[in-house]
Image: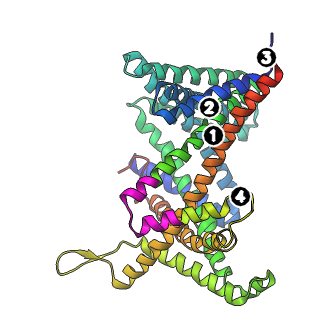
Amino acid sequence: MIFPPDLITGVISFIFTILIFSYLIGDNPLFRIAVYIFVGVSAGYVAAIALWQVIVPRLIYPLVFGSMNEKIFAAIPLLGSLFILLKVSSRMAGVARMTMAFLVGAGAAVIVAGAVMGTLIPQVGATINFFDLNAAVAVGISKGEAFGNGLVVLFGTIFSLVYFHFGASPKADGSMHRFGLIEIAAWVGRIFIGITLGAVFAGVYAAALTALIERIASIINFFANLFGNF
Amino acid sequence: MQVITAFIAIASGVLVLGGYFFPALAGVQTLLLNWAIILAGVAAIVGILNLTSVHMDKIRRGEKGSAYSALLVIGLAATFFFGMILRPQHNVMQMVLNGIIVPVEAALMGLLTVSLLYAAIRLLRRRTDMMGVIFLLTAALLFLGSATLPFGDIPLIGTLIRPWVSQILALGGARGILIGVALGALTTGLRVLFAVDRPYGGT
């Protein structure tokens, strides 16, 4: 008797969902079994993906089937890979530093470019665009409302940023205090940050609730399909 | 060795960064990023090897919880073995993905509903200051405002207050936090590029 793949997937999925939900009665061996298997399977899956989708097409394939240029260019990351593998041995770990230095340098450059072009410029631009009153009128928002909203967003952005300024000077009694105006702006910034974190919390809670409903629905569907088939 | 590693980090960083601004360096940037992707893949494999060796040691020493470690190693070895032979797109591997990985992730996410609710109640009991009240009030307002109810949106909360709080008030704070994070990332990145910070091992 051959079981259909969907049924096998459904049974495994059902068992693991129940094992994870057993955590609701407290930390127990069933939950731990599910989590340890999950970590092992995920690590094995990631290793297989890394090999088949990164290392084989980008390193092995050019080295075996590529032109002379491709082989030379692939030889450098091959050497770097060997250096990283030497990191497993504590005596040879120093050699891996060169590869790590390359990775850190390239990563830092990507982070710098990403921060400037992916966050700073778009966020500042979007804040300025709130004051484009003609564009607001074109989508049916009055100029006064658009300007008021723009001011709230602008002040929210500035005050939230000020909150993260922790420069302080010592007072006569030895205590440390921020400059008066900065202290007031930081206090307003705290309110904006509280509202933002509340909004983030609501979003995360809604996502978690959706996942919970999806899992409960999958359990109900599993039983419905199982008893529907018999 | 320290000078060599600092030189490698600065040179690779400057060349990759230059590729964003000077089209002539775009080819070099692509090549370096391709190498970085390969090395990151190898580093991931080394990390997984380290995970395996830690749990193998636990099993060898017969430490408490070594049975769980055995399950982890068996799961890892079996998935990696079949993944290498069948490739990740194969039906068996998709069965592993849809039968174990996705349901466990979703179930763990579902468990968050209980932990987050518990955390919110603890916050209200232990820290009833202005920040705590604003935080929970905003969360409750947005949650009520976006709930799908049989009679539609709750008047005022769903139609006016929720959109204004989430799209204007929360946006201001979020933008401040995002710009702050970006400035922090920029500073950290520049410190690495100027070799002030050397997280790769040089002092």
The chain containing the residue under callout 1 comes to B
Magenta segment boundaries in residue numbering: B121-137
Which residue is under mark 3?
A3
Q: Is residue A209 left or right of residue B1?
A: right
* Quarter of the image where one finds residue A97: top left
Q: CA distance from mark 4 to mark 3?
A: 41 Å
Q: Is residue B177 left or right of residue A93?
A: right
Q: Nearer the viewer, mark 1 or mark 2?
A: 2
Q: Amino acid at mark 2?
A: Thr
Name which residue lies at 71% across and 57% down.
B148
Q: CA distance from mark 4 to mark 1?
A: 24 Å
Q: Under tag 4, what secondary structure?
A: loop
**In the rendered image, which quarter contains the N terminus of chain A?**
top right
Residue B197 position within the rendered picture, expressed as x and y whole percent measured from the top left: 41, 57
Which residue is under mark 1?
B106
Residue B181 in the image: above or below residue A178: above
Color scheme of the displayed model: rainbow
Q: Under tag 3, what secondary structure?
A: loop
Q: Under tag 2, what secondary structure?
A: helix
Residue B95 in the image: above or below residue B116: above
Q: CA distance from mark 4 to mark 2?
A: 28 Å
Which residue is under mark 2?
A17
Q: Which mark is residue B149?
A: 4
Residue at the left extreme of this rendering: A173
Residue B20 in the image: above or below residue A103: below
Q: Nearer the viewer, residue B152 or A51?
A: B152
The chain containing the residue under callout 3 comes to A
